[in-house]
Structures are given as structure tokens and as C-alpha cells.
Amino acid sequence: MSRYDHLAYTSSVRRVQQQMGSASAADRRLGRAAEEAVPLDANAAAFIRGLDGFLFASVGETGWPYIQFRGGPPGFVHVLDAHTLGYLDVRGNRQYITTGNVRANDRVALFFLDQARQTRLKLFGHATAVPVDEDPALAARLDSPRTDGTVEQLVTIRVEAFAWNCPNHITPRFSEHELSEALSPIRERLARLEQENTALRAELAVRRGGSHQDAARHEARHEAPHAARPEARHEAPHEARHEAHHGDPRPDAVGRQVSREV
């Protein structure tokens, strides 16, 4: 990983490290400079393939940096080989700031972050962004998986160096898919428990002296507590007939009788 540190630790950075007391630790990280670009190892390649997004940093001709998020299904960033990443770029807000930047200065930084596992990978590289019809064979290779949308460009990044970053202060967050997978066993267990409770309630109703038919009616009332019971639907008309012919002894009967007369 020393090549990444040699590229990142400029003279200005080294002076700050000296002032802040971290120069000795930085010296240990530097080690011997790697003259050639550092290829991705198996762990880095698998990590990149497993993510559904990353941050892409470029620098404009004014010297100002620009950071853009790129997302898609896991694997939309293809590891073409140990030195090359690629993906199909789809139409967005049509500002093309990153595209303009890399055509003037191909040096970029990529930041891959897995918040669920509190892991991040940073990478230096040289990027290209060309129309999709310039390399149909590569376009076909990058087509699955890819981000949904109208494909406009082929983006490739030639990896110069990479380094795993400190996991401190990464807040764990989980995608909907990750939560669904984690909660699936719990949902299955709840479903089994509900089935067992249904069977036990039916058995208890039978043991209390009711028939299986009574147990079924009991279970129906339990499952739908707000539904009207069959006997309740017959009680209301009977009560109305009783009031009409015999009066209502309850305290509010007078008020209801007045309302009927009015």
C-alpha cells in the first residue's frame, strides 16, 4: 500500500504531519516506494463488486474539486482486470461536470464505503469517459449488471493505488435489502408462532366444551375483532321491534322516542 501513501503524502502534507506529531507513524506507512501501479487484490476486487455505489472525485481546470455519487445494483462497477474498473454511465442531470473534468485532467479519487460493515476503500486512478459507441465490445461486457437508465458513456478507471481506510466513526447503516435479509428469519419465526397460537386457541376452545364449529367461530372472532358477529346483526332489529311495541326502559329511551315523534 506504500504507493498510495507516497502519492497522498505531498510535501505540504508531510509538514502538517510533522507539526501534528504523526510524522513517525507516517514514516512507517511509507516504507519503500512502489514505482508501478498497484494491482487490486482479491479482497479489494470483491469489495468493489459487492457495493451499490461509490463517490467519484475529480478536479476542474479552475483547481476546484468536484465529488459525484454513482450508484446502481451491486456489481455495476466491473473489475475488468487487476488494474482496471469500468461501468456504463447513464444520463443524469446533464451537467457533465465529472466528464469535463476527466477529459482535461484524468486523475481521480474513488471512495468505496460499506456502512453496514463499517469498511471503506480509497483509490487513486486515471479515468476516461467516452461515448458508448466507441467500444461496443466493452459496452456489452459492462451491460450486466448496470445502472438503470439511458446509457451515454463508457467510464473506465485505471487503478494507480488503493488503501483500506480506518473504520472509526463510520455509522452503521443498512439498505432495505440488507434489512430484509437480516429480518427474514425473525419474520419466519413469527409466522410459525402465529400458526401455533391459532392451533392452540382452537384446541383450548374445544377443551372448554365447545365443538370444532364453535372453535372455528371463536378463531374467526379473534382474527377479525372489528368484524360484526352474526348474532349481533340480528340483535339490533329485534331491539328496534321491542322498543316500537313495548317501549324502552333505559334512561335514554325518552330522548329516542321524542326524536322519532319529531
Image: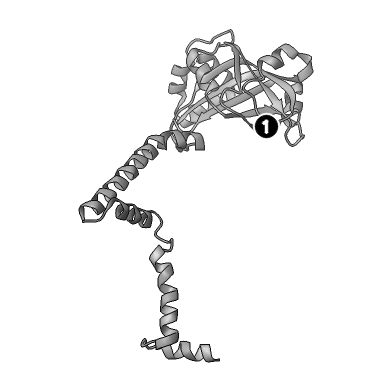
Report x, y in % for residue 207: 20, 52
| Circle 1: element type | strand
User: In the drawing, does residue 114 fall left or right of residue 130?
Assistant: left
Q: Quadrant of residue 78?
A: top right
In this picture, is 220 found above or below 191? below
Work out which quarter of the rendered image holds the C terminus and state it. bottom right
In this picture, is 174 found above or below 211? above
Residue occupying the point 25% across, 56% down: 210
Report x, y in % for residue 144: 63, 20
Q: Nearer the viewer, residue 81 or 158?
A: 81
How many marks can you see? 1
Amino acid, disc 1: Pro
Is residue 114 something that shows in the picture? Answer: yes
Say which residue label 1 marks: 65
Estimate how packed mark 1 is, as few (under 14), some (14 to 19) or many (20 or more) residues with alpha carbons within 10 Å. few
In this view, the residue farthest toward the top is: 36
Report x, y in % for residue 147: 65, 28
Residue occupying the point 76% across, 19% down: 132
User: In the drawing, does residue 73 fall left or right of residue 249?
Assistant: right
Residue occupying the point 74% across, 29% down: 150
